[in-house]
Image (cartoon, helix red, strand yellow):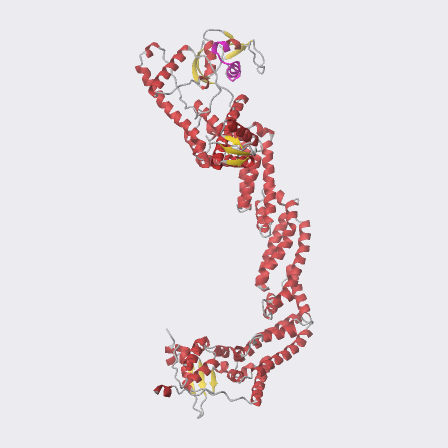
Amino acid sequence: MSRKMILRVPKFQEPKRMEKSEAQRLWLLLKDAIVEVQHMNASTLSFEELYRSSYSLVIAKRGDILYTGLEEVNNHHTKNLLDKIAQAVDERFLIELNSQWQQYKLQQIMIHDILMYLDRMYVKEPQLKVFDLGMFKWKQNVLIHSQINDRLVRMLLGLIHMERNGEVIDGALMKSLIQMYVDVSLKEKETYKQEFEERFLLATSHFYKSESNLFITNNSCGAYLKKVEIRLIEEEARIKQYLDESTGPKLIKACEDELIANHMQTMIEMETGCRTMIQNDRFNELKLMYRLFQRVENGLVHLKNEFAGYVRNEGHKIVNQPENLKDPNALITSLIEIRNRFEKTLSQSFANNRDFINSVNTAFESFLNENDKLSESLALFIDKKLRGGFKDSNDQEIDVIMNKVILLFRFLSDKDVFKKFYEHYLAKRLLSGRSFSEDLERTMISKFKQECGNQFTSKMEGMFTDMRLSKDALDGFKNYLQTSVEMGKLPKIDMSVRVLTQGFWPTFPPHSCTLPPLLSQYCDLFTKYYCHAHTGRRIIWQTNIGTAEVTFRLPKKTHVLALSTYQMLIMLLFNDAEKLSLKQMAAGTSISFMDIQRSVKPLYSGKYKVLKRTPAVEKSKELSENDIFELNLNLKCKLHRIKFAATSQTDSEPERQHTRQRVDEDRKIEIDAAIVRIMKSRKALIHNDLIVECTKQLSSRFVPQTSMIKKRIENLIEREYLERFPDDRRRYRYLA
Amino acid sequence: QDYSNLFQNHQFADFQVEIQMQNNKNSIFDCHKCILSSRSDYFKALFNSQMKESKEGKVLFSNVSPLIMNQILKYIYIGEIEISHENAIELLIESKKLLLDQQIIQTVTSFIKT
């Protein structure tokens, strides 16, 4: 009840219907004011009065009078301005246009402010907002008018052209005029794009097309690259200075197309181009080229291919150089050198780009496996280093070299071949006591282990264990000898034995020889001792890889000769004879004639000659069975101990063949294992799939030949691991 | 936190809002341009206009009562307003004309509707 009283809301007074004459009066008031504004006489006007007038018209629903009136006033004003501006000549034109435009823009802001209520409450789409209406009128009546637009764009482009040619222009003026195209665009800068940007980009392409063609024919590639870089920096600055930022990507793209993309092939092939730069290690120029090519589509692919091609070519040359084929050390050294060189190029010029690195690696892989010598050469290279080649290097340098070795090793497709050679040379180093440092040996092996896992190095590590255990066994043997009964009867000799576990060590070609009785007795004693200490083991003597020291008594002097077992046996024969033919030597020692030849050679043809050939003949002449030798009693040597090379450092061809054969044997086993593994899990498989799968599984160790896999499959069928399907001969089934 | 201090003691005031009265005893409010312009697009435009008002540092209103203007200014400074059945309609009209924020327009409108 009482609520009614409180709810006595004052009745909303509908504004009195405005008389037409009153509406007209208000409009005229506003119109005069707008004209004053357009003549820059705003300071005496009352904002409140004008705002209230426009407000009153709008709430009296007379906004239409105001809006259409405004349109007319703007129309009229801009048409007047057009004449004024069009009359200006030459440079005055731009200045006049700009100053009128700046004023016009200010006026439009003022008009918008006065008519803000109209703008907010009356204007509805698709009508233009008050300010936009002003912009539209300017565009329609001034900017895109035939007397203005073309003239303006031509002058703007002319100025930009001048600036590109090194002249100074008024950047602020440019910015204002270019921004005008953006300001009058109603949506998405369409006027700017249509009227200005499109023509600007065209002019840009045209300018750089002719400039680049001319420049590149008259200058070096390096100079051209620098020019391009400068041009791109200038254009970036131009965007900031007076273009709309939306033009940025398009402008840069246009420049890149003309300056880089269109000339890539030339820059690669020209005389001073990419090839020469790579050849001469011009890192800075290449870096610049990389940076610029990176900007265009597929640019880096060109550069990468060119670089990879060069790498492959250089590598190919090194791998096939006749001197390098003879000298493994030189070969590996030059390979490490080019690797270093290309790594430097990669890091200094190509930002260590993954793709570049990969393609260089692929190139290395291809030329390193071009010839099958590399595995052995690499093993020999390390052998030489570990025999003392590292003597003058510090830890860091050694580490660098070892890492390079691992790197080259990584590219080898036949890692098993390398492994065999490495084991072979390692065994030789250990047995002949020629290894420079056990620490370094172990470091090298641990690096292989890191690279390939335990399996790869287990045998090598086994060798080291054997060496250690042998030492213990030998100490034990010496104690045993002192307590042994038989010892009293034998003359004392210093004997050292190494017990090698079969399987860890490479098998040495079997050779037989007859040991002098004294040595045989010692050997028997050791066998007895060792087999007693380790029951169930069997000892096979490999005397031929041993060494011996022999006292050589001359009439005036005594020397100690360090000899191989064979050489010792030969020399001992001279205790009972003055002259011996090779044939007799062979008969007396049961050594093969070939080994006799090899063993005798250092004794009579080396620096110190303990034997002489009678009658004396030319050194180079091949030895024959009937050549006769006698002791050289006139030996002149200041050294007390004389060391003789057992055989030549590198292996003889038969030994190499032997190693190869063993690799092949091992491969057969590996392939068998792989085939069985695959078939066991897949049960049935088509021939081609089996080959592919098998190759894939083995690729970390070697690349098996298809023919070899085929043979192994046949073999496994014979051994009834597999069978062919009776209805499809190309499919195999696993027989459990 | 709010500007009630400034609203009450007019310190640093740099603009006058004058209300024209029938008896020629005009009411004058001392105000701060920065505060008025931050809450009202009308005042922002007026200060920018470089017309008479911005030169003289005052504006003259004729069709509004000092009480209403006081409420409007209170809202502008403090964010509070006293709406009653007596002043609601006038408040709405004036806040729309002065282009105040939507919040007050909605508040007053919903007050009137209930």
Residue A450 x %, y %: 44, 36
| Position of A631 relative to A649 (above/below) | above
Residue A595 located within the stretch drawn in magenta: yes
* Residue at the farthest left position: A483
Nearer to the camera, A349 or A22: A22
Residue positioned most to the bottom: B23
| In the depicted structure, whether residue A490 falls above or below residue A133 | above
Segment colored magenta? A586-607
- In the depicted view, which residue is nearer to us: A207 or A48? A48
Spot occupied by residue A602 in the image (x, y as percentages of width and height) = 51, 17
Query: Is residue A57 shown in magenta?
Result: no
Q: Name above or below for residue B47 compared with residue A600.
A: below
Residue B102, image x and y in percent? 45, 76
Residue at image position (57%, 45%) is A283
Q: Nearer the viewer, residue B99 or A143?
A: B99
Instruction: Considering the whole magenta stretch, tell me its main secondary structure.
Output: helix
Give x and y (percent) for residue A603.
Answer: 50, 15
